[in-house]
Image (tube, rainbow, N blue to C red):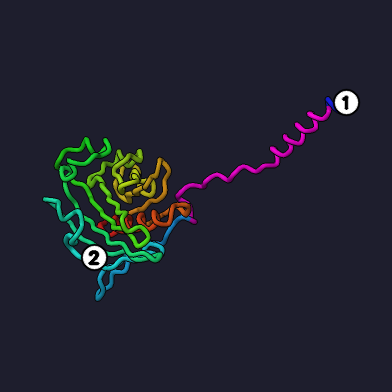
Amino acid sequence: MIKTIYGPVIALCLLFTACATVKKPAADPGLYIAANELPVKIKDGWLTAKTLTLGAYTTSSRTNGVAANTPAKQFKSTSDAFYFTVKGQDAELPVQVLSTGKITFSNRPLPAYLNTLPGDAPLWYIFAGGTAQDPLKSWELLLKKNIAFLELNDNKPVGILRSSTDEIRITAHNRYGIRNSTEKICYEFQLKGVPVAAVVTGENPRAWIHSKADANLQRTLAAIMLGLLFKS
């Protein structure tokens, strides 16, 4: 009888002890930490063309215009167009940057925060081609060109980065500048609601890419952020 009663009790005690000693997984410290920050360097000498470096990624100099064999060749109206190449981490990506009206994308589905804009609202468009590791996958960025400080105060969504299979929402905030100001805009890239990258444009640029992001995604994010830095 004693064995019958105490057997289950001892088993339960051992189970509780085992559970109590299991360590909980460490919480993700988030994006904006030193371990995720990448140094941004700008080379713009008297006798050399301007180039940018973001961590292990380096750009070529920029060429004005729209590159051949890019989707932007089909756009009826563009401005501020230029293109360049990003090299790093055994990859090379062509990048096209330009501005065009929202009406250019009237035949495509857009998120509500872009779809409700008037047809002549200017958008930044950045296209990044595929890599040797993923040659068929290209990405395009659609981003509001005119952002109000009230949107920055609340980190509102202002754009989208997407491929044929994935979507990343882009928000913008001014936490590294002054509230009620459009100085030091920080563009934040959110994958399924989780910040995976961010870049502060302007005179003192900064950039972060989450170390846990997929390697191919890191390459794409670096290329797109270099496009944003090049245009600023």
Placement of 26 over or under 1, stated as above or below: below
178 to the left or right of 14: left
- The part of the chain drawn in magenta is 6-35
Residue 159 lies in what quarter of the image? top left
- Where does label 1 land, which residue? 2
From the viewer's side, name the closer residue of 30 and 166.
166
Quick one: SS at disc 2? loop
| Amino acid on which disc 1 is placed | Ile
Residue with the most extreme bottom position: 47
Residue 173: percent from the left, percent from the top?
A: 35, 44
Q: Give the residue pinned by disc 2.
A: 62
At a point 31% along the width and 62% down the height, the residue shown is: 93
Q: Residue at x 27, y 62 (%)?
A: 94
Q: Measured along the vertical axis of the image, is residue 68 above or below residue 180?
A: below
Within 10 angstroms of label 2, few (less than 14), some, or many (20 or more) residues?
some
Which residue sits at x=18%, y=58%? 81
Q: Count residues near mark 1 (Cα–Cα under 10 Å), then give few for <14, some for 14-19, many for 20+.
A: few
Mark nearest the camera among 1 and 2 is 1
Foreground of the two, 186 or 131: 131
Q: Is residue 46 above or below residue 222?
A: below
Q: Main secondary structure of the magenta part?
A: helix
Amino acid type indicated by mark 2:
Arg
Res. 203 in view: no
